[in-house]
Amino acid sequence: MKFIKPKFWDEKKLSLFSIVLLPISIIIKIIVFLKAHLIEKKYFDIPIICVGNIYLGGTGKTPLSIEISKILKKNKKKPAIIRKFHSDQIDEIDLIKNTSKNLIVEKSRAHSLNEASLKGFDTMILDDGLQDTSIKTDLNIVCFNGAIGDGNGLTIPSGPLRENLSRLVNCEMVAININNKDKKNIKFEKKIKKINKNLDIFYTKYFFHNPSIKKFKNKKIFAFAGIGNPNRFFNLLKSYNLKIQKEKPFPDHYKYSIKELKKMINYAKKNKLELITTEKDFLRIKKFGLKTIKFIPTVFKIEDEKKFIKNLKKYIQ
C-alpha cells in the first residue's frame, strides 16, 4: 500500500479527520468481522506460525519471521517462510531471499502451504498472515512498534489499525519492536494485557553493525526511506549520534524513479552529504547501479531469546 501515514493516526487526541472517517472505519470493521466468522478454515497437519500485525506497517514482521526461521533451523527443524504474492512488495521478498532459501511465494497462502508440505518442510511461518482467516494456525504472534503502540486506537481509515485490538484475544504472543536505545512501552503492555492476560510479551530490537556504522561517524548525512515507518530508521541513525542533516520519507514499498534518485544524489553532492537509505530501499534501487547511495546493515535481535524459544517450542512439537 503506497501512502505516507497521516500524522493524525498517531495522535492520542481524537482529530476531526478521524471523526469524519469513522463511518468508513465502521463499514471496514463489519467486513472484517463477517470475513472472520463466515470463511471456512483450512486445516493443515504441519505446525503453522503466523507472524502478523494489527497496526498497519512498520512493526518488524518480516525480520521476526526470518529470525524465527533461523531459530527453528538451529533446533533441527525444516521451516518454510510463506508470503502471499503482492507485486508492490518485492522488496520484502528480496529481503527474505537475501538470508533464506526456504521462501515460498504464491497468490494463495493455502497453495504455498501445500507446496511447502510436498517439499518436505515441517514447520510453516506465515509472514503477514494475521488477517487471513481461511487458515487454521497453531501460534499467532502480533508485532507492534514500541514507540507508537496502537496509535490513536482506531481502525483504518480513521486510524492505523487493520482490525480491533480485541483480535489479541485469539493470539498467544506479542513482539514489540524498538530501536537499540529505546525504553520499553510499559503503558502499552498493560493495555494489551487487559485484552488478553495470557499474552507472552517479548521485545525485538534493531542494531547497526559496528564496523559499518563507524564509516559514517564524522560525516554529514542525507537519509531517505520508503518503509512502513521511516521515522524509525531516522531515529535509529540518530541513536548512534550520526550527523543527520536532511531526512526524506517516502511511502511504504515506494517505487523510486531514476530521476528522483539522481535529484537526491545531486543534492547530497552539492551539500557534501552521504546519501543513506535502508536495506529494503537499497534492494529496490540497486538495479540502477547508483554507487553513491549506501545502506548500513542492521541486526535484528529478540530480547530474552531463550524464553522466546521455549515458548515457540510449545506450539511446534
Image (cartoon, rainbow, N blue to C red):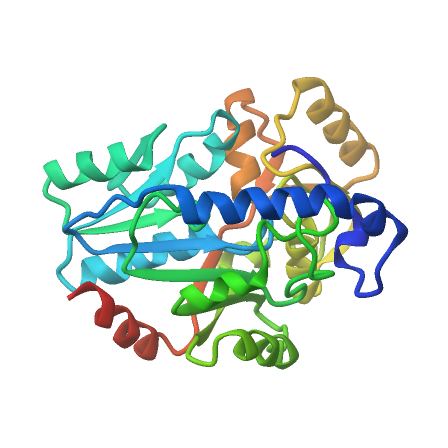
- Residue found farthest to the right: 16
Decide if residue 143 is in sight here: yes
**What x and y, as percent, mark residue 116?**
18, 39
**What x and y, as percent, mark residue 10?**
75, 58
Whether residue 48 sits left or right of residue 55 in the image: it is left
Q: For residue 172, what is the image quadrant?
A: bottom left
Residue 128 or 252: which is nearer the viewer?
128
- Give the quarter of the figure containing the C terminus: bottom left
Residue 15 or 10: which is nearer the viewer?
15
Whether residue 157 sits left or right of residue 195 in the image: it is right
**What x and y, as percent, mark residue 100?**
29, 44
Q: For residue 76, what is the image quadrant?
A: bottom left
The residue under the point 29% across, 51% down is 136
**Number of numbered markers:** 0
**What x and y, as percent, mark residue 158?**
75, 49
- Give the quarter of the figure containing the N terminus: top right
Decide if residue 223 is in sight here: no
The residue under the point 52% across, 43% down is 279
The residue under the point 72% across, 52% down is 159
Whether residue 163 sits left or right of residue 241 in the image: it is left
Residue 64 or 248: which is nearer the viewer?
64
